[in-house]
Image: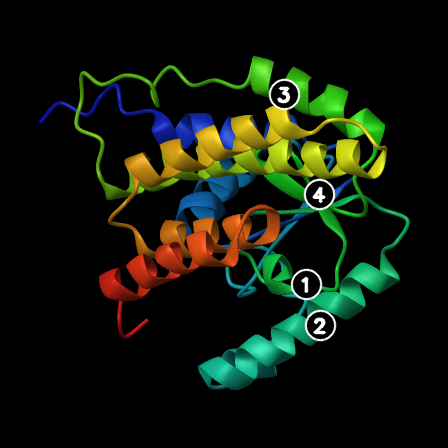
Amino acid sequence: TDLSRNLVDMEYGKNMLMGIEPGSIMFTSGDNATFVLAYFNKVEGLRPDITIYDDIGRIFPNIYGEEFLKMGAVDYQKAVNQKQREFINNNSDKSIYFILGGIIFNMDDIFRHPVGCLYKVGKHNKEDDEKNKQLWDKYQFSAMNDNTFFHDYWARDIKAQFHLMKGECHSYRSEYLKSAGQNNQEELRLAKEQYKKAEDEASDISTIMNFLGIAISRYFSADEAMEFYKKSIAISPNA
């Protein structure tokens, strides 16, 4: 199979780097995001103005300590969670970004909001709406939208994440409008539309179904969310 046009991961990496403010900190997680960011940052030298860390401390600088690498999975997760919380508190003067599914993503008490395809620590504000619009207009999707080559599991996972994050942008804007006493129904409709595209793209990927369950539970209904959780468990019952 000719995969010479499969530049999905390249678009993913460049799109992620595009929206990060100069001097910011970025936390990455998972193979798709971590390795493409490592390539662009370490090989091509893109965005030397930002500092990148990964959730396991093996690709980018390890802020967790060598003893973390010897822990079991459960203890390791708890320890990294605590270390990243401390890191956020000690770097409150800097913008901190993280990806869908990272350690910070699971910290429900940490305020966050979507900025393009990433999350940013802190509360959503009006300026974010304009930045989101600009980013989604600038993002590269040529390979992601090219159906002339086979889209494997990883390509579909990336495409689904983009739909999910665009849905998150609409959902967070709907909450902002609601808090301002304005009509938010159109934003909720657009959010649901993007979540459906994510489902259609990756209905066989457990993590995407789980993320959709989380998103739907926050902005729509628990019953709808439960269906996605059930799908996630059915795909990977031992995960």
Q: Is residue 114 left or right of residue 234?
A: right
The spot of residue 21 in percent (x, y) is: 76, 32
The alpha-carbon separation of the residues under discs 2 and 3 comes to 31 Å
Q: Residue furthest right?
A: 93
- Identify residue for label 2: 83
Instruction: Indicate which label's residue lies in the foreground, 2 or 1.
Output: 1
Q: Mark 1 or 3 closer to N-term?
A: 1
Given the image, on which type of amino acid does mark 3 rest? Answer: Leu
Q: Secondary structure at mark 4?
A: strand
Q: Are discs 1 and 3 less than 8 Å apart at CB? A: no
Q: Mark 2 or 3 closer to N-term?
A: 2
- Identify residue for label 3: 135
Q: Mark 3 or 4 closer to N-term?
A: 4
The alpha-carbon separation of the residues under discs 1 and 4 comes to 12 Å
Q: Quadrant of the N terminus?
A: top left
Label 4 Cα neighbours within 10 Å, binned few <14 / some 14-19 / many ≥20: many
Residue 194, placed above or below residue 109 = above
Q: Are discs 2 and 1 less than 8 Å apart at CB? A: no
Q: Are discs 4 and 2 less than 8 Å apart at CB? A: no
Please name the residue shown 60% across and 46% down the image: 219
- Identify residue for label 1: 108
Please name the residue shown 91% across and 49% down the image: 93
Q: Mark 2 or 1 closer to N-term?
A: 2
Given the image, on which type of amino acid does mark 2 rest? Answer: Lys
Instruction: Indicate which label's residue lies in the foreground, 1 or 3.
Output: 1
Label 2 Cα neighbours within 10 Å, binned few <14 / some 14-19 / many ≥20: some
The alpha-carbon separation of the residues under discs 1 and 3 comes to 25 Å
